[in-house]
Image (tube, helix red, strand yellow):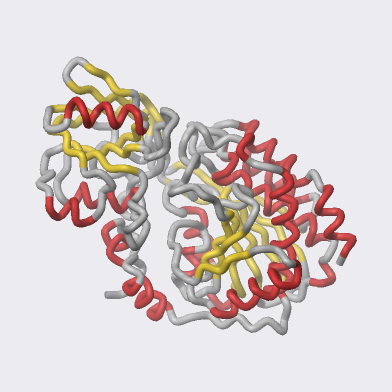
Amino acid sequence: MSNWIGDTFVSEAGWSHLERLVEIGDRMAATDGELAGARATRDALAKYAHDARLEEFTVQGWERGEADLRAADAAFECLALPRSPGETATGELVDLGHGLPEAFEETDIEGKIVVCDTNVPSWYDRFIHRREKYYYAVEEGAAAFVFRNHIEGCLAPTGSVGTEDRPIGDIPAVGISKEAGARLARAHEGEQVTVDVELAAAPPDATSRNVHAELGPETDERVLVTSHVDAHDIAEGAMDNGAGTAMVIEVARALAAREDDLETRVEFVAFGSEEVGLVGSSHLAAERDPDSVRAVVNFDGVVRGRDLAAYTHGFDALDDALEAVSDRLKHSFTANPHHGPHSDHWPFVEHGIPGYHVYSETDDEGRGWGHTRADTLDKLDIRDLREQAVVLTELVVEIADETTTIPHRDPQAIAAELEEQDLAEGMKVTGDWPFNG
């Protein structure tokens, strides 16, 4: 075991790939940049794994144009949220603060321009996703949606709207920095403001792709080791999710040296179009027989901090495997047994397939620098990538071991837990509820 660990501690494979991805720049879903990232990832995987390939699928396209927010004679810098419609809306400005569900219930926002923060208060019992806030605004008849960052630094946030059935959103949506948003609300709440979004293009049948490669014996089951290669167009996408894709490369390199240790086929997948609704992973999950997937190990948010954590979605066997690896390597790795339905493991987990969402523990509230122009390579450290690659490589071997029993779960039990954890309402309002009832 010591040779592969030592090799990982001096490896440049993952970090070099991360540098390659951020050099591409714009890797927005279904663009030339995403294609360049997918090809680079395929070529990197081909050095260590077999049958490296791209598999295409169709997705609703969206290309950013200009966005404008005006109040009286003042203009406020903003940017369109991906999949916002290209429309203009004017209405009274209403500041709903954190955008909690009860704020929408208690406030008349019909025909008005709604402002909501990117975070939720520390005392609130759950995270409220951007799209949930957006669709509360849609349901209550708002004319437009303004998403205000809670992170300082004059950073307007991005993040998609739209649903699977209606991928272009219902009302114009823009992101605005904390500072500009504070000035907007302070000076103009209750007054008429105008939000104007222009799109460069929104082709209904754009092309995205997933990257695949494989290692290990031919078995009926597979362990999927995943990330997403796309990123928002306003930044390098280093943390979200260049680091996750770099981790896939580093784990593939380490597993290639341990291929004889694998007792289940491992398939590496770097998904396309995650940032616009988990489209690539949903495409693959719809194609695969759930019984053919032993487990999903999804990297999204790794390397941002030194210690690892993972949503384990109520799969006790995933908790046990994580704990065994953490104890064996004496490395902190926190199991979060709750559900986290916001990354590429989820289209599999909702069908009862065991799935990890692996991320780094940080002191950030919400996304931190993510989904802003500040998502850049200088925020990350090669030491963290290498250390975490050791732990995650060992975890994949543990999951692939034939003696590790990982039962699938009844999707209806998962649905019941989502209700108990107060996540169901938000999933229903955003059109992400896949269960009957």
401 is higher (above) or lower (below) than 143: below
Residue drawn where x is 40% and y is 42% of the image: 159
Q: Where is residue 177 shown, x and y percent of the image?
A: 37, 31
Residue drawn where x is 49% and y is 69% of the image: 349
Left or right, 358 with respect to 181, comes to: right
Q: Quadrant of residue 82?
A: top left
The N terminus lies in quadrant: bottom right
Q: Quadrant of residue 412?
A: bottom left
89 is higher (above) or lower (below) than 206: above
- Residue 51 seen in render: no
Q: Quadrant of residue 429?
A: bottom left
Q: Residue furthest front?
A: 123
Q: Nearer the viewer, residue 5 or 201?
A: 5
Q: Where is residue 84 shown, x and y percent of the image?
A: 32, 38
Residue drawn where x is 54% and y is 62% of the image: 357
244 is higher (above) or lower (below) than 393: above
